Image: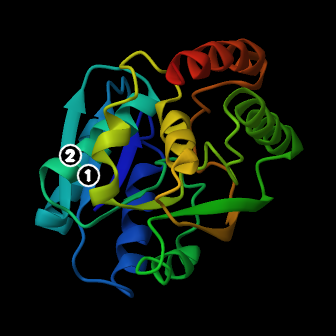
Amino acid sequence: MVVVPVFNEEEAIQTVITEWNTELQKHTKDFVFIVINDGSTDGTQKTLEAIHPQLGTRLEIIQRENRGHGQTCLQGYRWAVEHGFQYVFQIDSDGQCIPKHFGDVWSLRKTHDVIYGKRTHRDDGWKRSFASWVLKMVVFARSGALCADPNVPYRLMRVETLPKYLAKIPPDFFLANVALAVLLKKSRQLKHGCVRIGFRKRLGGQPKVRLGQFGGRARELVRQLGQLQK
């Protein structure tokens, strides 16, 4: 199952779904896209409805009120648990995730519980790269979990490992996908894998968190990580 959280990505979402559909079919025929529209205010929903007939049962569209990216990801993971999927893979809806790396991730699924992409080359600028590094260091300093790339959207997880960790994440944790990465990394029962990936520029739209907001978000993350460990 492929989780795709989406907010105001009418410019990118059709291309993202189309190219990922092509790539995934090279490696498996058994997959479905769960696209969760997190309260988009543009034409995202109309675009999704327009491409639905082309994909049929391979595309499930869920609409919800806006709750933020992290909690939207968690809803997708819980959907995978509830519907009995074996693996769940996440990508973002802005086109930055490059499909060609998926084969390297998929090849590790039988020997690893969690496989993350590590963004070793980025086309979206050094400031974004630096922000990701700062996030990694903040997460390590506060939680003791040295995640390869804690906020990366490129992640494949064995679904059976998720329920007990998902249950530990508060509903107001804004970077809930980071919280899950921390909990998984700190588990001694799980085997983690990492694949080097590239990261493109966005195909359209605007980042959900602007660079000027990172300072405030980092302070809030420190506070929430402290609560997560209690």
Q: Is residue 40 left or right of residue 214?
A: left
Image spot of residue 2 (x, y percent): 33, 59
Q: Which quarter of the figure is the N terminus placed in?
A: bottom left
Judged from the image, the secondary structure of the residue bearing numbered disc 2 is helix
Q: Is residue 129 left or right of residue 222?
A: right
Residue sitting at x 27%, y 58%: 160
Give the residue pinned by disc 2: 79
Image spot of residue 146 (x, y percent): 72, 47
Give the residue pinned by disc 1: 34
Q: Is residue 54 above or below residue 141?
A: below
Q: Is residue 134 above or below residue 77?
A: above
Residue sitting at x 27%, y 37%: 45
Query: Is the residue marked by circle 1 packed among few (<14), some (14-19), or many (20+) residues within 10 Å?
Result: many
Q: Residue 206 falls in which quadrant of the image?
A: top right
Q: Nearer the viewer, residue 223 or 100?
A: 223
Image spot of residue 71 (x, y percent): 39, 29
Which kind of residue does numbered mark 2 sit on? Answer: Trp
